[in-house]
Amino acid sequence: MNLKINISILLLLSFVIWTGCEKESEPVKATLTLIEPTAGDTIPAGEALHMHGTVEGTGELHGYSLTLTNLTTNQLVYSGSNDNHQTSYAFDEHWVNMEGVTSSMRLTLVVNLDHDGTTSSKSVDFVAAQ
């Protein structure tokens, strides 16, 4: 009888120690780099804006989106995304300035770190000239 109690206690302690020592995984983090445009750039009318950058994750990332917003009119003028699961991304997109008036613009990069809505973002402001 004592042997059964000792084995039961030993199994219970082993289970508690084993589950207590499980290490939770570290949340994924990302380094976002916007290479182009740079803050304060001016893109002349009819010229192409080069949206170039990289994302490096500490684990699997769950896609990214690029948006270009005309801050003067508050209109979205470009939107692109990548839903591939990777540990890094490189992007090189283009948009032609056809705004017609000089406008303040913002390029925003948003990276999905998980499927629970955790994101990391980076923005840069520039000018689209007439």
Image (spheres, helix red, strand yellow):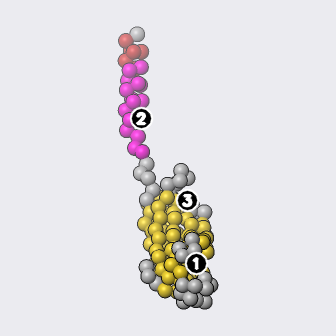
The residue positioned 46% from the left and 68% from the top of the image is 122
| One can see residue 8 in this view | yes
Q: Position of residue 103 (x, y in %)?
A: 53, 81
From the image, tell me which residue sits under label 2.
Answer: 19
- Dot 3 or dot 2, earlier in sequence: 2
The residue positioned 57% from the left and 71% from the top of the image is 74
Residue type marked 3: His
Q: Residues within 10 Å of mark 3 (few under 14, many from 20)?
A: many
Task: Determine whether the residue tagged by mark 2 lies in a helix, strand or loop.
Answer: helix
The residue positioned 59% from the left and 81% from the top of the image is 94
Residue type marked 2: Thr
Residue depth check, mark 3 versus mark 1: number of the one nearer the observer: 1
From the image, tell me which residue sits under label 3.
Answer: 62
The residue positioned 51% from the left and 65% from the top of the image is 110
Q: Main secondary structure of the magenta part?
A: helix
Q: Position of residue 77 (x, y in %)?
A: 61, 75
Residue depth check, mark 3 versus mark 2: number of the one nearer the observer: 3
Task: Determine whether the residue tagged by mark 3 lies in a helix, strand or loop.
Answer: loop
Residue depth check, mark 1 versus mark 2: number of the one nearer the observer: 1
Residue type marked 1: Glu
Q: Is residue 9 above or below residue 80?
A: above
Gap between marks 3 and 1 measured at Cα = 19 Å
User: Does the magenta segment cover residue 126?
Assistant: no
Magenta-drawn segment: 8-24
Q: Is residue 20 above or below residue 128?
A: above
Indicate the quadrant containing the N terminus: top left, top right, bottom left or bottom right: top left
From the image, tell me which residue sits under label 1.
Answer: 93
Gap between marks 3 and 2 measured at Cα = 29 Å
- Dot 1 or dot 2, earlier in sequence: 2
| One can see residue 48 in this view | no
